[in-house]
């Protein structure tokens, strides 16, 4: 009788163990982590800027396409093949491949050793295909033209592809990266005197990256930044920042805003016009191009405090 009870006890233990143990593991597992858009932009923006400076593709377009095509870096194609742009194999691809269903079953996609290779191949892909050649005649700041042109050239079958790219750029202020002009040259020698690698960062001081726009030093506002905090970090006077950025002491900053560290200029050194989008103000345009407000009003024969209309062309230089 005792042996029979022991056997029943052992059976009951194994039954409970078999049915309970897998579920206990399941509920003990943490949920799968997914990268956010902010994290994706922070991780890959320097690569996108480098590609812009080397190949002429707007950094905002590269980032927006990467975000859209890779689901913020969380798609299987991005995680297992480092393919952030959904580029398929095509006949000229000699590298590794990754098979997954897309428009058709078991389609062939390019596979890369690292994400940076995907960004580089994306630039080469656009430059090597004749149907995209007209895009490189556009200004790097014309991200809307690029988005619409990509759709017209057949980059994606989605009819709303251009609108989706533009929304991603606007929502995340990715257009700010299209104005990065400063480069530092990597002096390592390469074979056959190949072009030197270009990196976008001018300098890093007190944990702040400093960039140039219209030959004026500026920083990009990060979470938690205030004028006072930036002044302390960069050993500047608070009044200088307010003066250079034409703001009052009660002005609040938002993530992605530009804060100039030097006085703005009388006009743009490169751009001639800016086409106003809905909601843009003269101050926004002033910050975007590094032009003093009074000179921007003067160039456009507008009264101080007057705001532009959507579609209006704002003169940036004589």
Image (cartoon, rainbow, N blue to C red):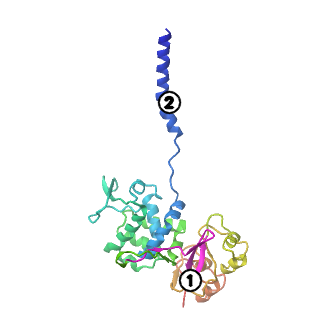
Residue at 66% from the left image edge and 73% from the top image edge: 234
Q: Residues within 10 Å of mark 1 (few under 14, many from 20)?
A: some
Q: Earlier in the sequence, mark 2 or mark 1?
A: 2
Mark 2 = which residue? 20
- Can the viewer see residue 144? no
Span shown in magenta = 194-220
Residue 25 lies in the magenta-colored region: no
Residue lying farthest bottom?
318
| Figure check: 225 above or below 314 | above
What element does badge 1 sit on?
loop
Give the x, y percent position of residue 249: 73, 74
Q: Quadrant of residue 82?
A: bottom left
Residue 42 screen position, x and y as percent: 53, 64
Q: Is residue 154 above or below residue 218?
A: above
Q: Which residue is mark 1?
A: 215
Return the x and y of residue 60 as percentages of the image width and height: 48, 70
Does residue 232 appear in the picture of this structure? Answer: yes
Q: Give the left or right position of residue 314, taking residue 250 as reference.
A: left
Residue 201 covered by magenta stretch: yes
The residue nearer to you, when weighing 183 against 283, is: 183
Image coordinates for residue 132, horizontal then vertical, percent:
35, 73
The kind of secondary structure element at disc 2 is: helix
Cα–Cα gap, marks 2 and 1: 66 Å
User: Outermost residue, left direction?
Assistant: 91
262 or 191, nearer to the observer: 191
Residue 70's disc is none
């Amino acid at each position: 009788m005792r042996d029979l009870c022991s056997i029943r006890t052992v059976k009951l233990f194994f039954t409970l163990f078999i049915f309970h143990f897998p579920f206990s593991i399941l509920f003990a597992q943490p949920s799968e982590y997914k990268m956010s858009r902010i994290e994706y932009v922070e991780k890959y923006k320097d690569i996108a800027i480098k590609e812009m400076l080397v190949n002429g593709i707007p950094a905002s377009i590269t980032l927006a396409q990467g975000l859209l095509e890779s689901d913020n870096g969380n798609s299987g194609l991005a995680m297992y093949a480092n393919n952030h742009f959904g580029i398929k194999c095509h006949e000229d691809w000699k590298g590794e491949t990754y098979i997954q269903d897309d428009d058709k079953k078991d389609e062939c996609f390019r596979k890369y050793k690292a994400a940076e290779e995907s960004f580089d191949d994306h630039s080469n892909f656009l430059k090597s295909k004749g149907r995209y050649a007209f895009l490189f005649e556009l200004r790097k700041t014309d991200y809307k033209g690029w988005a619409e042109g990509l759709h017209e050239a057949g980059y994606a079958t989605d009819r709303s592809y251009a609108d989706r790219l533009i929304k991603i750029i606007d929502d995340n202020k990715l257009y700010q990266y299209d104005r990065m002009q400063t480069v530092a040259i990597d002096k390592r020698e390469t074979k056959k005197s190949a072009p030197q690698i270009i990196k976008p960062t001018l300098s890093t001081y007190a944990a702040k990256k400093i960039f140039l726009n219209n030959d004026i030093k500026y920083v990009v506002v990060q979470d938690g930044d205030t004028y006072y905090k930036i002044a302390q970090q960069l050993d500047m006077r608070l009044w200088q920042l307010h003066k250079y950025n034409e703001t009052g002491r009660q002005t609040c900053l938002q993530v992605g805003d530009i804060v100039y560290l030097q006085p703005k200029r009388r006009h743009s050194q490169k751009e001639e016009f800016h086409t106003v989008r809905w909601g843009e103000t003269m101050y926004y345009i002033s910050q975007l191009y590094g032009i003093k407000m009074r000179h921007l009003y003067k160039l456009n024969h507008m009264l101080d405090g007057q705001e532009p209309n959507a579609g209006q062309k704002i003169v940036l230089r004589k």
